[in-house]
Image (cartoon, grey):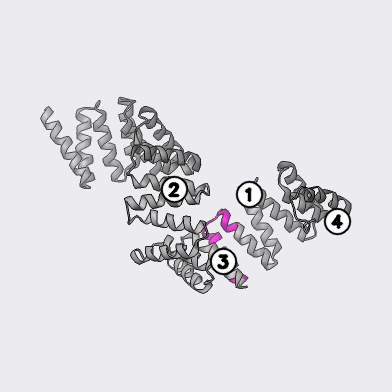
C-alpha cells in the first residue's frame, strides 16, 4: 500500500467516524493497523470507531495498544479513560485521565472529564478544583461551568453554584442540565416561588423532563400547595416508576396529611425497586416510627447498618427506638458506645440523660446535662 493510499484511507476513515458510519470506519482502520501495526494513530482511530459502535472492550484494547506504542500519547490515555468509564470502571478511568494531565497539564478535555467524574470518585472538593482548571483553559465551555456548579452544590455552596449555572446558561441558553441545576440551587436557598417559575419555564419547552417535574413538585410542596405537588409526583411515578427522586417527597406529603398508610406503601415500593437505597430506608423508618410500628422501623435501621455499620444516625435512631420499647439498658449501652466514638456529639449525652431518667437515676441524668446548659450547648428545657 502506497503512502498516498494510506493517507486516502485514513481520511476516509475519519469521514466515516464523523458521519456515523462506524462499521465502515472499523473495517478501514483495521486494514490500516494491519498494514502499519506500529502506527499509534491508526490504533487510536480504530479505538474511536470501536467505541462509537459499542465494542468497548475492543476499543479499550486498541487504545491501550496505542499507548504502548507511544506512552506519551495523551489522546489515547483520554480515550482509555472514556472507555473505562463507559464500562463502569470509574476508578481506572480516573487514573487514565490523571495520566493524561500528567503528560499535558493543559489538556482541557482531561480536566473536564475529571471534574465530571471526580465528584463520584474523590469528592466535590477535588471536582471543584478540576472544573476551575478546565475553565481556565476553556473559559467558554458551558460543561465546565456545569461541572463546577455541580461540585459547589454538593458542598452546599448554593450561591456560587447558582452563579455558575447562570454562566453556563449564558453560553448555552437551552441546556436542560444547566436549567435544572439552577432550579435546584435556588430551591436549596429556599426561594421556592422563584424556582417554581423557572421550573415552569423549563417544562414549557421540555414538558417530559422528569427532573423539572420533580423540582416543580418540591416547589409546590414548600409553597403550601400539597395537592398540586402530589399530582405531579404521582404522574412522575406512574409514568416512570424507576425515577427514584419522586418517592420520598410524595411520601412525606402523604404523611403530613395524616395518610401514613399510603406514605409507607409508596416507600415500601421504592425499597423493593431500589434495594439498599439509604434515603429510602431512612424515610421508611421515619414513617414506621410515626405509625408506631417500632419493630418495622428497627428493622429498617438494621438494614441501613448492614450496608453502613458506622452510620451514627441509624445507630442513634435505633437506640432511641430501644428506649421507647422499654429496652433501656440496651439503649444506654449503644448511646454510651456512640458517645465514646464521637465525644463532641452532644445529642448522645442528652439522649443518655433521658434514658437514665427513665431508669430512675436522676442524679446521673442531672450530672450529664447540667454542664451542657452552663455552656449553652443545650436548652434548659432539654435538661
Residue 172 position, x and y percent, is 32, 52
Q: Is residue 197 left or right of residue 281?
A: left
Q: Which of the 4 quarters of the picture holds residue 281?
A: bottom right
Report the disc number at residue 306.
1
Cα distance between the residues tagged 3 and 2:
29 Å
Q: Earlier in the sequence, mark 1 or mark 2?
A: 2
* Residue topped by disc 2: 149
* Residue topped by disc 4: 359
What residue range appears in magenta?
260-281
Q: Residues within 10 Å of mark 4 (few under 14, many from 20)?
A: some
Tell us which disc is closer to us: 3 or 2: 2
Q: Residues within 10 Å of mark 2 (few under 14, many from 20)?
A: many
Cα distance between the residues tagged 1 and 2:
33 Å
Report the disc number at residue 251.
3
Q: Earlier in the sequence, mark 4 or mark 3?
A: 3
Q: Earlier in the sequence, mark 4 or mark 2?
A: 2
Tell us which disc is closer to us: 1 or 3: 3
Amino acid at each position: 500500500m502506497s503512502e498516498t493510499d494510506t493517507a486516502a484511507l485514513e481520511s476516509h476513515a475519519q469521514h466515516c467516524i464523523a458521519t456515523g458510519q462506524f462499521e465502515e470506519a472499523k473495517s478501514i482502520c483495521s486494514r490500516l493497523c494491519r498494514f502499519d501495526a506500529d502506527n499509534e494513530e491508526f490504533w487510536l482511530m480504530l479505538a474511536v470507531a470501536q467505541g462509537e459502535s459499542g465494542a468497548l472492550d475492543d476499543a479499550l484494547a486498541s487504545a491501550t495498544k496505542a499507548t504502548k506504542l507511544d506512552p506519551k500519547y495523551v489522546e489515547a490515555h483520554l480515550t482509555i479513560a472514556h472507555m473505562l468509564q463507559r464500562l463502569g470502571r470509574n476508578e481506572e478511568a480516573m487514573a487514565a485521565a490523571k495520566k493524561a494531565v500528567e503528560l499535558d497539564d493543559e489538556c482541557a478535555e482531561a480536566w473536564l472529564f475529571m471534574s465530571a467524574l471526580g465528584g463520584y470518585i474523590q469528592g466535590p472538593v477535588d471536582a471543584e478544583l478540576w472544573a476551575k482548571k478546565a475553565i481556565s483553559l476553556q473559559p467558554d465551555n458551558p460543561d465546565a461551568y456545569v461541572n463546577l456548579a455541580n461540585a459547589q452544590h454538593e458542598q452546599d455552596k448554593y450561591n456560587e453554584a447558582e452563579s455558575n449555572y447562570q454562566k453556563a446558561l449564558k453560553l448555552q441558553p437551552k441546556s436542560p442540565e444547566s436549567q435544572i441545576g439552577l432550579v435546584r440551587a435556588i430551591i436549596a436557598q429556599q426561594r421556592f416561588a422563584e424556582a417554581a417559575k423557572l421550573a415552569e419555564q423549563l417544562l414549557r419547552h421540555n414538558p417530559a423532563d422528569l427532573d423539572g417535574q420533580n423540582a416543580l413538585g418540591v416547589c409546590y410542596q414548600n409553597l403550601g400547595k400539597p395537592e398540586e405537588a402530589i399530582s405531579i409526583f404521582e404522574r412522575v411515578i406512574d409514568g416512570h416508576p424507576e425515577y427514584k427522586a419522586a418517592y420520598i417527597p410524595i411520601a412525606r406529603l402523604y404523611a403530613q396529611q395524616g395518610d401514613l398508610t399510603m406514605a409507607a406503601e409508596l416507600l415500601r415500593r421504592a425499597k423493593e425497586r431500589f434495594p439498599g437505597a439509604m434515603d429510602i430506608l431512612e424515610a421508611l423508618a421515619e414513617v414506621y416510627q410515626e405509625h408506631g410500628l417500632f419493630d418495622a422501623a428497627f428493622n429498617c435501621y438494621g438494614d441501613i447498618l448492614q450496608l453502613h455499620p458506622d452510620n451514627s444516625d441509624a445507630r442513634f435512631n435505633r437506640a432511641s427506638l430501644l428506649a421507647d420499647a422499654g429496652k433501656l439498658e440496651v439503649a444506654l449501652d449503644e448511646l454510651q458506645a456512640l458517645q465514646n466514638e464521637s465525644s463532641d456529639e452532644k445529642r448522645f449525652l442528652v439522649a443518655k440523660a433521658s434514658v437514665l431518667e427513665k431508669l430512675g437515676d436522676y442524679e446521673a441524668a442531672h450530672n450529664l446535662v447540667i454542664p451542657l446548659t452552663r455552656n449553652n450547648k443545650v436548652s434548659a428545657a432539654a435538661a
